[in-house]
Image (tube, rainbow, N blue to C red):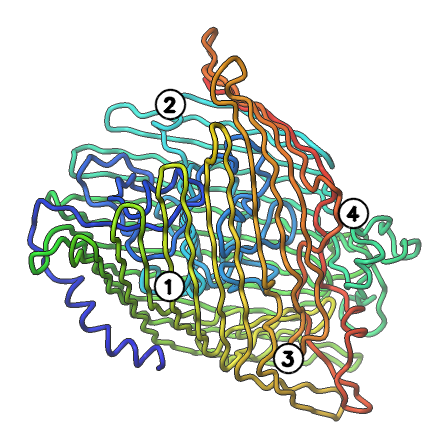
């Protein structure tokens, strides 16, 4: 059954229910939630949620946002304990790995990480795709589906919710994998100001300042940080500054205004991605300052001597001056109005600019992507047919302007631009509506109906230039694409008693191609790729939550997702752009387990495990070399980039009472299985297991101006394991002479794929609250 057929069956009913005028009643909806791996985020599986709205101290009884503990969703809440508050969280990846279903990859520079949910973004090496990202209820995903975590400093947050599985009925376009909702610390949570410093191996230094207060109708929190490091690889130093402001004004009990401002600047060098063979020789690309004297295993890139065509010169990352100088600025505001005691109307508008200057490998990408996001929604609690219900309707619109010139790099002078090889001018917009109904069918059963419908328009032109001794050739690719997508959802939750909850969910998702996907050819060059179709998935979730006591929580979820036209990205080789294609049919299936057990006074164990098996069920790949073309059936092959197994396990002890109260320690292991990096399943990136150890101390101060002191020291990768932290998928190839597919040996020597993970490193720090 296609998504459009499913929509025709569920869509009309969901719109009628969620959009209807629900009579007011005194009862509250029964809200059932999944286990939180970090117990702060959820009030308990299946118990009525006492929601704290994102960024606003709303009066008791006002309608919570629909993303606060929605019924039937597969959501993990990650709190501060053992993830942020008492350890040096150097990137958001070390926090999000606490959720089942999440895979973390090293991104391009600094604290950039690539996050995937159920493997949906595991093939990316640049930006977050297939996942909608929000902060304090404001959307941080741009209209082309791109998000980045450079601007995300973990210490700014109090809670992070990870929504797993198709989420387009709730979040619209690009939510085929799920969504991540960040919640910063509010003014009343901070209630003063804090300073902190972390320092550690490889020149790592991080300074933070936090201030927050609530007074009368005003509440404000401000987070600022400066982070820098020399990096553990050659040519990998970075510095980044972040400002994150959340302010609210409540002039009356029925009206609340919220302001959100984020600004992040990043200046980072980029180490070279190596081949798998080079990684085994020189994983950290050391001794690679100059190509002429490079150590064995160094990666070099061939740049045109004249910056346009002809003879090339090999350069290292140092000689090429590879790096990123990016800025991300977000300014957004929201007005919330309680129409009555059971109905809340929200309207928000945000400006989001992604500005970048990225000279690395063989090209330099420059551009500015300004975007606008508008959302208005209505939430109402009350009765429907005499049953407690929550209804939600929303209208969303966003738009993005794209201007990106691309240049060759030259070998003379760091980051010196050569010839212009492409100019992309495009616009992308999304307009859609969403509706949702949560209905308490009885004391034990709760049902959910949801739907979204969205129109996406992409118009643009890409000019590509190629150069020879005889002159310049210009090619033009025009795009004028319109997509209409519909995604329904149906969920049912059964709670026989306080200890058990059983969940079943059928949901759909869609991800349209981004404008940038339409203008990179399978040769990895600017050109025409405008035939791409919408990625769609139909997912089935079945799970249970068990909370027999306040000290034990267990969640198990099985999922099976059917994809149509899955968007898969891969690299045709070193220095070439990754291109995107549609795999006609594929399947993702697996199991997610989360557990949190305080098994003795002071002791606590945490587990997050994912099994994820992804295969092509219909896909024939065409490969060419010279005058030869061959077609290969990939049906039954594993989809590259996705490890079958992902595990986080942690055990810790915090002294509960006595003179040493506040002293604690934990040890954790992060395990990731191996995975294929090509469609033919010829070559695997090896899996790994690393161990981290932490000791921390927190105490309340009774004299002087300071109120609280936190100290912590952590050894990451305790046993100094060498491992692959990121591996970009590689395109298979054939021999131009025989037409036979080249083997694993050829792939293993293809550069531009692998980043090694950090070796053993030590980071310690303090945080002092006043």
Q: Which residue is mark 3?
A: 474
Mark 4 or mark 3: which is in front?
4
The residue positioned 39% from the left and 37% from the top of the image is: 40
Closer to the N terminus: mark 2 or mark 1?
Answer: 2
- SS for tag 3? strand
Q: Is residue 572 above or below residue 753?
A: below
Give the Cα separation between the discs numbered 4 and 3: 38 Å
Q: In the rendered image, which quarter is residue 375 located in?
A: bottom left
Closer to the N terminus: mark 4 or mark 3?
Answer: 4
> Residue 231: image x %, image y %?
72, 42
Q: In the rendered image, which quarter is residue 770 located in?
A: top left
> Residue 221: image x %, image y %?
39, 31
Tag 4 near tag 3, CB within 8 Å: no
Mark 2 or mark 3: which is in front?
2
The residue positioned 12% from the left and 62% from the top of the image is: 20
Closer to the N terminus: mark 4 or mark 1?
Answer: 4
Q: Which residue is mark 4?
A: 234
Give the Cα separation between the discs numbered 4 and 1: 46 Å
Crowd band around label 1 with a 10 angstrom C-alpha radius: few (<14), some (14–19), many (20+): some
Q: Is residue 13 above or below residue 262?
A: below
Give the Cα separation between the discs numbered 2 and 4: 42 Å
Closer to the N terminus: mark 3 or mark 1?
Answer: 3
Closer to the N terminus: mark 2 or mark 4?
Answer: 2
- SS for tag 4? loop
Residue 191's disc number: 2
Tag 2 near tag 1, CB within 8 Å: no
Mark 2 or mark 1: which is in front?
1
Residue 217's disc number: none
Tag 4 near tag 1, CB within 8 Å: no
Q: Is residue 715 above or below residue 607?
A: above
Between 161 and 706, the one lying in front of the other is: 161
């Amino acid at each position: 059954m296609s998504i459009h057929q499913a929509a025709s069956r569920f869509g009309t009913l969901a719109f009628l229910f969620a959009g209807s005028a629900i009579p007011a009643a005194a009862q509250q909806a029964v809200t059932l939630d999944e286990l939180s791996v970090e117990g702060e985020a959820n009030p308990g599986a299946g118990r009525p949620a006492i929601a704290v709205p994102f960024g606003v101290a709303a009066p008791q009884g006002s309608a919570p946002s629909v993303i606060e503990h929605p019924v039937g969703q597969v959501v993990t809440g990650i709190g501060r304990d053992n993830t942020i508050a008492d350890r040096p969280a150097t990137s958001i990846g070390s926090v999000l790995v606490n959720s089942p279903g999440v895979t973390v990859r090293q991104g391009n520079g600094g604290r950039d990480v690539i996050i995937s949910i159920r493997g949906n973004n595991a093939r990316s090496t640049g930006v977050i795709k297939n996942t909608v990202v929000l902060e304090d209820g404001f959307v941080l995903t741009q209209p082309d589906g791109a998000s980045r975590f450079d601007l995300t400093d973990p210490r700014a947050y109090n809670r992070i919710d990870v929504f797993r599985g198709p989420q387009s009925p709730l979040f619209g376009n690009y939510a085929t994998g799920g969504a991540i909702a960040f919640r910063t610390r509010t003014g009343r949570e901070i209630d003063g100001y804090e300073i902190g410093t972390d320092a550690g191996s490889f020149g790592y230094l991080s300074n933070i300042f936090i201030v927050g207060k609530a007074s009368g109708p005003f509440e404000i929190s401000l987070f600022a940080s400066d982070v820098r490091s020399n990096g553990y690889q050659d040519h990998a130093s970075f510095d980044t500054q972040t400002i994150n402001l959340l302010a609210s004004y409540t002039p009356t009990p029925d009206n609340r205004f919220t302001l959100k401002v984020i600004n992040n600047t990043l200046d980072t060098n980029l180490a070279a991605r190596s081949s798998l063979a080079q990684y085994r020789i020189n994983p950290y690309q050391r001794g690679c300052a100059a190509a002429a004297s490079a150590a064995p295993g160094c990666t070099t890139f061939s740049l045109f001597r004249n910056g346009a065509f002809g003879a090339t010169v090999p350069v290292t990352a140092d000689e090429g001056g590879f790096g990123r100088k990016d800025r991300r600025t977000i300014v957004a505001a929201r007005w919330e109005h309680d129409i009555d005691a059971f109905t809340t109307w929200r309207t928000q508008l945000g400006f989001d600019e992604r500005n970048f200057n990225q000279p690395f490998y063989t090209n330099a990408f420059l551009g500015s992507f300004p975007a606008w996001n508008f959302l208005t929604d209505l939430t109402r609690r009350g009765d429907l047919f005499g049953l407690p219900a929550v209804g939600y309707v929303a209208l969303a619109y966003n738009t993005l302007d794209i201007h990106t010139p691309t240049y060759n790099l030259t070998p003379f002078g760091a980051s010196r631009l050569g010839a212009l090889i492409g100019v992309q001018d495009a616009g992308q917009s999304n307009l859609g509506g969403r509706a949702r109904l949560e209905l308490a069918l009885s004391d034990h059963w709760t049902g959910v109906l949801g739907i979204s419908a969205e129109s996406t328009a992409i118009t643009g032109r890409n000019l590509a230039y190629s150069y020879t001794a005889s002159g310049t050739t210009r090619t033009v690719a025009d795009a004028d694409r319109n997509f209409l997508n519909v995604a329904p959802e149906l969920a049912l939750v059964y709670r026989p008693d306080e200890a058990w909850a059983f969940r079943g969910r059928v949901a759909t998702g869609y991800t349209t191609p981004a404008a940038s996907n339409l203008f990179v050819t399978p040769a990895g060059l600017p050109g025409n790729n405008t035939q791409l179709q919408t990625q769609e998935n139909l997912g089935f979730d079945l799970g249970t939550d068990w909370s027999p006591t306040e000290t034990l929580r267990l969640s198990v979820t099985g999922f099976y997702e059917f994809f149509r036209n899955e968007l898969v990205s891969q690299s045709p080789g070193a220095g070439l752009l990754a291109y995107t294609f549609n795999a006609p049919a594929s399947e993702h299936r697996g199991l997610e387990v989360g557990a949190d057990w305080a098994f003795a006074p002071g002791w606590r164990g945490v587990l997050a495990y994912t099994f994820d098996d992804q295969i092509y069920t219909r896909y024939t790949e065409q490969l060419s070399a010279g005058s030869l073309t061959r077609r290969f059936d990939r049906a039954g092959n594993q989809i590259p980039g996705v490890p079958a197994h992902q595990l986080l396990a942690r055990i810790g002890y915090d002294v509960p009472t006595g003179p040493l109260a506040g002293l604690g320690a934990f040890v954790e292991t992060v395990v990731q299985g191996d995975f294929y990096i090509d469609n033919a399943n010829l070559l695997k990136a090896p899996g790994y297991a690393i161990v981290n150890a932490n000791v921390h101390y927190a105490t309340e101060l009774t004299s002087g101006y300071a109120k609280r002191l936190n100290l912590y020291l952590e050894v990451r990768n305790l046993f100094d394991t060498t491992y692959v932290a990121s591996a970009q998928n590689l395109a298979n190839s054939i021999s131009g002479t025989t037409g036979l597919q080249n083997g694993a040996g050829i792939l293993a020597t293809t550069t531009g794929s692998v980043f090694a993970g950090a070796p053993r490193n030590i980071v310690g720090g303090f945080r002092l609250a006043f």
